[in-house]
Amino acid sequence: MSSTSPDGDFSDPRPFSLADLPIRDDLRGLTPYGAPELKVKVALNVNENTHPIPEAVARSIIEALATQLLTVNRYPDREFPALRDSLASYLGHGLTRENIWAANGSNEVLQQILQAFGGPGRSVLGFPPTYSMHSIIAAGTGTEWIAGERDAGYEISPQTAVDWVTRTDPDLVFFCSPNNPTGTAITLDTIAAAYDATDKIVVVDEAYAEFGLAGDPTALSLLPGRDRLIVTRTMSKAFAFAGARLGYLAAAPAISDALRLVRLPYHLSALTQAAAVAALAHAPEMLAMVDDIKRQRDRIEDALRELGYTPFPSASNFVLFGGVPDSHELFEQLLERDIIIRDLGIPGHLRVSAGTEDETTAFLDAMRDLTPSR
Ligand SMILES: *Cc1c(COP(=O)(O)O)cnc(C)c1O
């Protein structure tokens, strides 16, 4: 036991670190989610919506919060019916309140899914390179992470998905479409084939769904008749609501019943619920920026291709590009110019989020400067 003096002096000559704690064996040596949080003028590293929410919408959210504040002495509504109604009508596809569940970001939704359907002795199959939080949440819930392999161009054909599901027999299958960090979408055929190949849970993380082409297929259309399929969404990206923390899912009603067993009581604050309902009432204005973001994304793709890089076609608000001789060096050179993008440790590749028009211009100008003509 280390001793502290009564007045709380923690100066101990012996450094005490994480490694000294009696932490779970399966967490030893792991690293936490670690996107750098640097104060940089042009931040294009975590796929945030770079456009602030319109002022008129902000005002209406503030009014909703002000009203809600008068009753925060009480616990919030555990079942958040108003928010689930708003989310269901936003999604359409014939969904109702019973099909919707929400939490503090889709990361929490994913965690609840793994708490209910994964856990020690169970496994989840994913297809890297993919959203780093999928394997981190698996680790946090003691669920074994199985890394499947993609086809060329980061695609996953129905056959590839079925082969991996059959071979590894996981308790859950995680897809991410459009996929972070590659920007590539998978077909509904792949999801349907994976679903038919298992009697377990299949999750499709559609965090970037709103950035696809109009009429792009969404796994929401697969939900009827598929009671083990879960589609997760978030207000963090298209809705410019990352700081408010609101993620959700659409699935058969029984899925929410499973998550009710693991969620903390009153997990969604009354203020979060009120803010999200108010924002959803302004969905068209909130989503008006999405078209501009898509324009900036297309600009990035075109300009990087012209410069000789190999951007992957993106259905999201970011672009992964290859053909970088030294990705670490280019990352640092951009940082020196007050621009941060993302180095995901994929050799020769970097990822950049679409910015406002000015931010995107700053990034592309810097790239022109930093790219030797070839
Ligand atoms: C950004 C992102 C999320 C969003 O997580 P929140 O907790 O809702 O902010 C979820 N999935 C993927 C693939 C993402 O890139």
Image: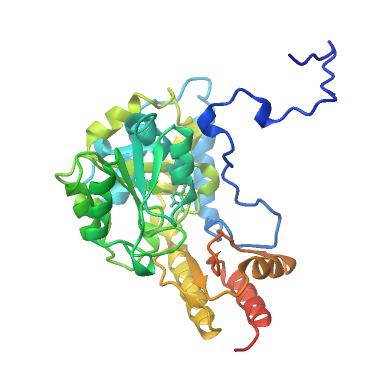
Identified at 70% across, 59% down, the residue is: 40
Q: Residue at x 66, y 31 (%)?
A: 18
Residue 106, given in percent of the width and then of the height, sits at 43, 43
Instruction: From the viewer's side, name the closer residue of 60 and 261.
Output: 261
**Quadrant of the snapshot with the C terminus:** bottom right
Q: Specify whether 360 is left or right of 60.
A: right
Residue 75 percent across, percent down from the top left? 47, 21
Question: Where on the picture, by quarter, is residue 294?
Answer: bottom left
> In the picture, which quadrant includes the N terminus?
top right
Q: Position of residue 82 (x, y in %)?
A: 35, 35
Q: Residue furthest top?
A: 6
The percent coordinates of residue 110 (x first, y second) are 40, 40
**Residue 306 left/right relative to 197:** right
Of the pair 212 and 79, the residue shown nearer to us: 212
Judge whether residue 222 can be spotted in this image: yes
Q: Is 249 positioned to the left or the right of 371 in the image? A: left
| Residue 24 location, quadrant | top right
Q: Is residue 83 above or below residue 72?
A: below
User: Which residue reaches farthest bottom?
Assistant: 374
Residue placed most toward the observer, 98 or 148: 148
Q: Residue at x 33, y 42 (%)?
A: 249
Q: Which sits in the foreground, 210 or 19?
A: 19
Residue at horizontal 82%, vertical 21%? 10
Q: Among all residues in the image, which is located at the extreme left? A: 225
Colouring: rainbow
Tell me: residue 25, above or below residue 201: above
Q: Quadrant of residue 119?
A: top left
